[in-house]
Image (cartoon, grey):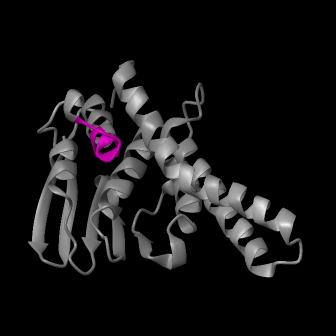
Amino acid sequence: MGYKTMTDLTLMHLMCAKICHDLSAPASAVAMGLEMLSEAPQDIPTRDLIHYSATATISKLELFRCLTGFSGMANKPTGIDLKKVLKNYWPENKITVIWKISDLENLQGPPARLLLATILTAADGLPRGGTLTIQPQLNITVEGPTARLREEAAQALTGQTSLSQQSASTIVPFFAHTLANNLGGKFHIHVENDHQFEIQMVG
């Protein structure tokens, strides 16, 4: 399956805005904790805050590296990389990922990046937590209380809106749509009920 390289600067700018938005809170918490620790060096809760926030920052950086990094490395990221970075990404195990793909090591490069963007989009439809079951062919079953994608995210994922209509809150599903389009595919969303929906890639 061929892959077309993306060069649109607007897409790049919005992805950078998304990264900065997600990193700002844990990074600011680290800075605040260090300032508090300088005033009370033995403050254990502050030390715990710094550790938690630093870990969250590292987790997000590793995830975004899989999503947008590894420049010049055609076989990265891999499915194994995705499984590793997602393991501790959501706080307090809010979202459980069940992998039904047996050959994760052979999922490499743009298809792996596409799967990660789709997983993040699917997780956005679980505001109260839940389960993502990753099936072969880049299909994801999403289950949890009030499981449903926001309308603007669903439209971005399925290509119903253009790049000029995106924001930092919708750029990841639009990024997934763009990756899928470059690989010759597109997304369908099938709603089972109020607690379950599926994201299916066809092409």
Q: Note whether residue 186 is visible.
A: yes
Which quadrant would residue 165 be assigned to in this image?
Answer: top left
User: In the figure, 147 relative to 113: above or below?
Assistant: below
User: Relative to 131, is 26 above or below?
Assistant: above
- Looking at the rendered image, the quarter that the N terminus falls into is top left
Placement of 154 over or under 171, stated as above or below: below
In magenta stretch: residue 144: no
x and y, in percent, of residue 27 in the image: 63, 53
**Which residue is drawn at the image coordinates 65% and 63% (left, top)?**
53
> In the image, 168: left or right of 185?
right
Q: Nearer the viewer, residue 27 or 125?
A: 27
Magenta residues span 166-174
Q: Is residue 4 left or right of residue 96?
A: left
Rendered-image quadrant of the C terminus: top left
Q: Nearer the viewer, residue 170 or 7?
A: 170
**In the image, farthest residue toward the front:** 39
Q: Position of residue 78 (x, y in %)?
A: 54, 47
Verify whether residue 168 appears in magenta.
yes
Residue at image coords 34%, 63%: 123
Rendered location of residue 202, percent (x, y)? 18, 46
The residue drawn where x is 73% and y is 66% is 50
* Residue drawn at (61%, 61%) of the image: 56
Q: Camera-side residue: 88 or 200?
A: 88
The image shows residue 112, relative to residue 12, as above or below, that is below
Q: Is residue 5 visible?
A: no
Q: Residue furthest right?
A: 41
**In which quadrant of the rendered view does residue 131 lie?**
bottom left
Task: Report how many numbered discs are placed on residues in the image.
Answer: 0
